[in-house]
Amino acid sequence: ESEGNVNRTITKVVPDHLLHLTKNGRDQALDAGRRLCELIGDENSKFIVSPYVRTVETLNGIKQRFDREVEVREDLQIREQEHGNLDAENMGQLHQHAQKFGMFYFRFPDGESPADCYDRASLFLESLYRGWEYNRAPNQVFIGHGLMILVIIMRLMRLSVNEFLELEPLANCELVVLERDPQNPKFTVSFVWRHGMEREYGGLRRKAEKPHSPPVWDGKPDSELLVNEPINTSEVASAKP
């Protein structure tokens, strides 16, 4: 939990990358360290962390639970989705417009869309793959941000856009544990583990109601022609910075 989780307007006056953990967020980080120690035990691990202040603070809390030094590398590619510099006054309208436009493709003014984050995830994983050739640590831990972690998993597991949109957001300091058989290069989600809860098996949580999928021509010559209706132009205008 960061300052932005308890004060949604703080990013109008403080850059997102500078936000600190709250007291509750520190407790969550310490507990995440406890859960990681339970999972990893005495095995070697490599940590990759987003350079944002709140993720570095989360790492510092996690390290308090380890009785040994851990290898850490900072990677800018796994930073949070950028919503601009400081939040615009009409940020609420922008989020509403993103739902109408299509949240995966909507790019915030001076910011990014999840599709842009997908490109970053691809670059990150390509770099990671090259490092695996020489890696000797059996565990790798990414300390990042909710949406970006899901985008990385989307890219790694080759999920479609619709499958990504079905996923529930991750909770603060939720562990997503991916494992693979030594003879199989494909990872699967073994379980997730939220703060204050037991391990949850069965993969990532999915929304109760599936997101709307746009109609697509089925290729049959006699099928009805599909035509788009424009979205509300007044709402488009109001969403401009």
Image: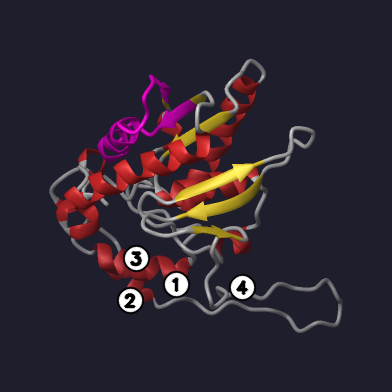
Amino acid type at image mark 3: His
Rendered view: 70 above or below 229: above
Q: Which residue is mark 1?
A: 100
Q: Earlier in the sequence, mark 2 or mark 3?
A: 3
Q: In this rendering, which labeled residue sits more in front, label 2 or label 1?
A: 1
State the CA–CA distance, disc 4 to disc 2.
24 Å
Instruction: Report if the CB atoms under discs 4 and 2 are less than 8 Å apart.
Output: no
Q: Which residue is mark 2?
A: 234
Residue at image position (61%, 29%) is 126
Range of the magenta residues?
46-73
Rendered view: 227 above or below 162: below
State the CA–CA distance, disc 4 to disc 3.
19 Å
Amino acid type at image mark 4: Ser
Q: Which residue is mark 3?
A: 95
Q: Quadrant of residue 5?
A: bottom left
Instruction: Report if the CB atoms under discs 4 and 1 are less than 8 Å apart.
Output: no
